[in-house]
Structures are given as structure tokens and as C-alpha cells.
Image (cartoon, helix red, strand yellow):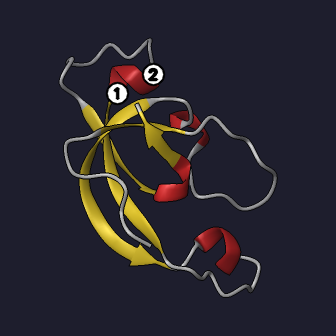
Amino acid sequence: MTPEFNPGERVRVRAAYPPGHVRAPWYCRGHVGEVERVCGEFGNPEQLAYGLSGEPARPLYRVRFRQSELWPAYRGPGGDTVEIEIYQHWLERA
């Protein structure tokens, strides 16, 4: 599967809450960040968790979020960030 996003692009994590094993932390869903890097392609862990093949492999990204984007009450320095690795099927263009 070809990566859809490039470093520097703004992306939004899908605001989805499916049951079962998922790899997008709840606190980043619906929020906007910036692709820091493409980490490569890996089997889909949401399928692998249930003993399935995980194919086709999916691009994995490291996405950087401002902490104030994730936690509006955050009182630390405005430049503080957190980076989260998120699979492509959880991302959309912001």
C-alpha cells in the first residue's frame, strides 16, 4: 500500500470508536497533528491481534501533536508536543 501522506502534512485522526483491539489512542481521535515521518509498512495490528494475516501491510506514520491540541487545559509551554505512531487507515487530510 502506498503512503498517502508526507512529512510536514497536517492530518486528522479519525473520530471513530469501534469495538475491539484498535491502535489509535482515544485521546488523539478527532485531533489534528503533523506527519513527522513515514515509519514503513507493517501488518495491520488490529487484524494480527485476532490471529489474522494483517495483510495488506499498511503505512505507519509518526504524527506530532501540540499538547494543547490534545488537552485544551494543558498549561505547559506552548511548544510542547507529543508524537504518536498511527496507521494510515486512522488518518485523513486536515
Q: Residue furthest right?
A: 19
Q: Position of residue 29 (x, y in %)?
A: 56, 36
- Say above or below: 71 vs 85: above
Question: How many marks can you see?
Answer: 2
Q: Residue at x 66, y 58 (%)?
A: 22
Q: Secondary structure at mark 1?
A: helix
Q: Residue at x 45, y 78 (%)?
A: 42
Q: CA distance from mark 2 to mark 1?
A: 6 Å
Q: Residue at x 19, y 42 (%)?
A: 8
Q: Position of residue 44 (x, y in %)?
A: 58, 73
Give the amino acid at mark 2. Answer: Trp
- Say above or below: 55 vs 26: below
Pointers 2 and 1 in contact (C-beta within 8 Å): yes
Left or right relative to 60: residue 56? right
Residue tagged by mark 1?
A: 67
Q: Secondary structure at mark 2?
A: loop
Give the amino acid at mark 1. Answer: Gln
Q: Position of residue 41 (x, y in %)?
A: 39, 75
Residue tagged by mark 2?
A: 71
Q: Position of residue 32 (x, y in %)?
A: 40, 30
Left or right relative to 79: residue 56? right
